[in-house]
Amino acid sequence: MHSFTEENYLKTIYHLSQLNDSPVQTNAIADGMKTRAASVTDMLRKLSDKQLIDYIKYQGVTLTDRGKTTAVSVIRKHRLWEVFLVEKLKFKWDEVHDIAEELEHINSGLLVERLDEFLGFPKRDPHGDPIPDKDGVFEPGQNIHLHEMSRGDKGVIIGVNEYTSAFLKHLERLGLTIGILIEIQEIADYDGSVELLVDGKLINVSREVTQRILVNYK
Amino acid sequence: MHSFTEENYLKTIYHLSQLNDSPVQTNAIADGMKTRAASVTDMLRKLSDKQLIDYIKYQGVTLTDRGKTTAVSVIRKHRLWEVFLVEKLKFKWDEVHDIAEELEHINSGLLVERLDEFLGFPKRDPHGDPIPDKDGVFEPGQNIHLHEMSRGDKGVIIGVNEYTSAFLKHLERLGLTIGILIEIQEIADYDGSVELLVDGKLINVSREVTQRILVNYK
DNA sequence: AAAAATTTTTAGATTTATCTAAATATTCAA
DNA sequence: TTGAATATTTAGATAAATCTAAAAATTTTT
C-alpha cells in the first residue's frame, strides 16, 4: 500500500496533468502540495522507484498506468465520500472537501464498493465533478468553463474547480449552484466580468469566478 | 491534534486500565501495540510531556483526564463507524474491526455527531460494546464474563472482547451471537470448558472462549 | 538479603517526510 | 549566443516513530 503522502502527490500530479498535455513540473506540484520544490524532488524519486511515475530529471513527470490507477481510485473515494456527507449526513457542499481529504485514504476495496452501492452509484459529486466507476472510467462530459462562453450562450452549471468554503458560499449567495440554468447577457471588455441571467435575475460575476465554473453547454 | 499513533497508544492504555486498577505497564502496552518496550518508553515520555498520561519511570502509567477524554472519543468514533458498516453497508460483524481502526482517526467533531444522529444514536456496537455519548458517558452495564458464571445461571450475550475474524466466525458457527439467551449446564473441572444450552441445543465451549464473552446476567 | 529473573530504560541507529541553503540546469531575453 | 532569470536538484539537517543491544531498576526466588 501507499502512504497518505504518496497518494496525495499522485492525486495532485493527476489533476495537474489534466490541465495540459505536457509533463507536470516540480514547482507546480510544490504549489499544489503546499510544500517546497526540494521536498517534491525527494518524493518524485521515491514515486519513480515505485514505478508510479515516469520521471526525468529537470523534465517533469507523467503518471504511469499504475500511478494513474492509484490516483483515480483516490479521487473516486474522495467524491463518493462527499456524496455520502451531503446526501446522508446533511452537510453543505462547502463543508465536505476537507473531511473527504481524510476519508479518501481509508483502505478497503470492499468499503468503497459497498458505499457506492449504498449511495445508488452516483455519477457526480456535490460540486458536479464526475465520479469514476470501479474500473476507473469517468462518464464523458463535454463541459466548458464559463469564461469560455459567448454572449447569448446558455448552459447548466455542472461543476466548479475550487472547493474552498469561501468560494462555494459566494456562489451560493449569487444563486449559482449545480444544476441551475444560466444565460450570458454581457461580457465586459475591460475586466472580463460577466453579466448572467439566473433564475430570472441579472447578476454580475468577476472573471476569477467565471474561470472556476464548469458549464454544460447546450 | 494528536497523531494516529498517539491516539492508538491512548486507546490501548485506556483498554488496559479497564482490566484492573493498577497503573498500566510498559510491556502490556508493547503487547497491545505490537511493538517493543523501548518504543513504548519513547512514546510514554512524549505523551507525558503533552500531559495526556501520568508517567513515573518504572512505575507504569495512568491516563490524565485529557488523555481519557481523547481515548474515549476515539472509542466512540470506532464504535459508531462499526454500526454504520454493519447497519448501512451490510458488513458482517467479523469484517468491521480493521476498517473502523482506520475510520476512528478521522478528525471532525461535526462528522461524528452527524453520524451518530444518522444511525439513530445507537447504544451498542455490533460486538455489544457500549458507545459513549458525545460527553464521553457510557451507559452503565452490569455485565460479567461467561467464565465467571455458575451452573444453572442464565443470561444474554451482550458483547465480546476479541475482534478477530477467526474468533467471531467461530462464535457464529456455535450460534453464539449478540442478544442470544444462554444457560450454563455444566462446567468441566479439568479444563474449565463449559456446556451451554443455546437455542434449544447443547454446545460445548473452551475456557478461552468463555473468557472472551460478556453476558448480561439475569 | 543476596542472587536470579524480569521489566524497563538508555544509547545509538534507521526510515520517512520534511526543510534551508547552495549548486546546477534550463529557459528567456537582449 | 551569452548573460540573467527561473526552475530544479543536491547536500546536509531535523522531527517523528521505530528498532536492537546494553544498562539499570525492580521483583521474585532461594
Image (spheres, coloured by chain):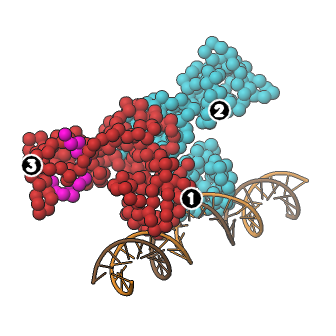
Chain colours: A cyan, B red, C orange, D brown
The quadrant of the image that shows the C terminus of chain B is: top left
Q: Nearer the viewer, residue A104 or B47?
A: B47
Left or right, A119 with reference to B202: right
In the drawing, what numbered circle is on residue B49? 1
Discs 1, 2: same chain: no
Q: Residue at x 64, y 23 (%)?
A: A173
Residue B117 falls inside the magenta stretch: no
Q: At 29% across and 44% down in the image, what residue appears?
A: B127
Q: Does residue B6 appear left or right of residue A206 in this picture? A: left
Residue shown at 51% from the left, 30% from the top:
A91
Q: Nearer the viewer, residue A19 or B20?
A: B20
Residue B1 in sight from this viewpoint = yes
Q: Amino acid at mark 2?
A: Ala
Which element carries disc 1, helix, strand or loop?
helix
Q: Write down the chain letter for disc 3.
A: B
Tag shown at residue B147: none
Q: Which residue is mark 2?
A: A166
Residue B130 screen position, x and y as percent: 34, 41
Q: Which residue type carries mark 3?
A: Gln
Q: Which residues are magenta?
A: B205-218
Q: Please, which residue is most extreme toward the top here?
A: A200
Viewer-nearest of discs 2 and 3: 3
How many numbered callouts? Answer: 3
Q: Which mark is residue B185?
A: 3
